[in-house]
Amino acid sequence: MAHPKIAPESLSRKGVELLSPLRPSSFEEGWYDIAEPDHFWLQWRLQVLLNALEDAGLSVDAPLRALDIGGGRGVLRTQLETRSSWTVDMADLDAGALLGCVPGRGRTLYYDALDRNASLVGSYDAVFLFDVLEHIAETKGFLRAALDHVKPGGRLFINVPALASCFSPFDRV
């Protein structure tokens, strides 16, 4: 397990809000070492998202609010806030990843969406689950929880791994 001894004070000093009880994470740390905003795959993923936002009628020029669930070190938030007027809150359960998260306009949260924090439920124009769903054992309940965070008329965007023929060392890490 990664990061079993990170103290709540360490997260607070980095601006991370603790909205769920801390627990050890088992996520592979090596992924964050290669998952930088300028990585070709993450650039491609962003472009696909920007096209999907346009197709959904969500303007990057509007002051919208979004939640990135399982955002790790905040790469997607950084990319979106750089290319839009949006405020993106970023939530993850990997305390070590959050310690390495670059601050953005939005909040950085140690938060389990299944907790359905009343201040967050129904608050977001868009919720993102990018490269998250494949790590969830009980997807139906998790998807319901994610949808609970979307305000009426908002959108849920999901990205999952592609075809097995596209599997690469990037996926292995």
Image (tube, rainbow, N blue to C red):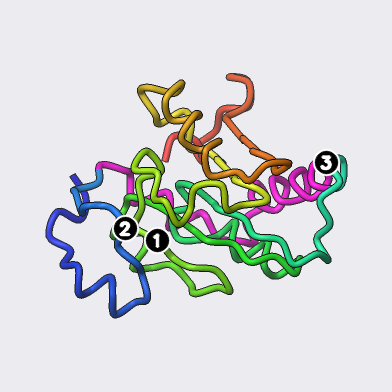
Q: Earlier in the sequence, mark 1 or mark 3?
A: 3
- Residue 83 position, x and y percent, is 76, 66
Query: What is the spatial separation of the Cα atoms under label 2 and label 1, in whole angstroms?
Result: 7 Å
Q: What residue is shown at x 49% (from left), y 74% (from top)?
A: 103
Residue where numbered disc 2 is placed? 19
Residue where numbered disc 3 is placed? 56
**As drawn, is 71 to the left or to the right of 66?**
left
Q: What residue is shown at x 66% (from left), y 48% (from top)?
A: 126
Q: Secondary structure at mark 3?
A: loop
Query: What is the spatial separation of the Cα atoms under label 2 and label 3, in whole angstroms?
Result: 30 Å
Do tag 2 and tag 3 residues touch (Cβ < 8 Å)? no
**As drawn, is 117 to the left or to the right of 125?**
left
Q: Which residues are magenta?
A: 26-53
Which quarter of the figure has residue 87? Answer: bottom right
**As drawn, is 142 to the left or to the right of 147?**
left
Q: Secondary structure at mark 2?
A: loop
Query: What is the spatial separation of the Cα atoms under label 1 and label 3, in whole angstroms?
Result: 26 Å
Q: Is residue 157 above or below residue 61?
A: above
Give the foreground label among 2 and 1: 2
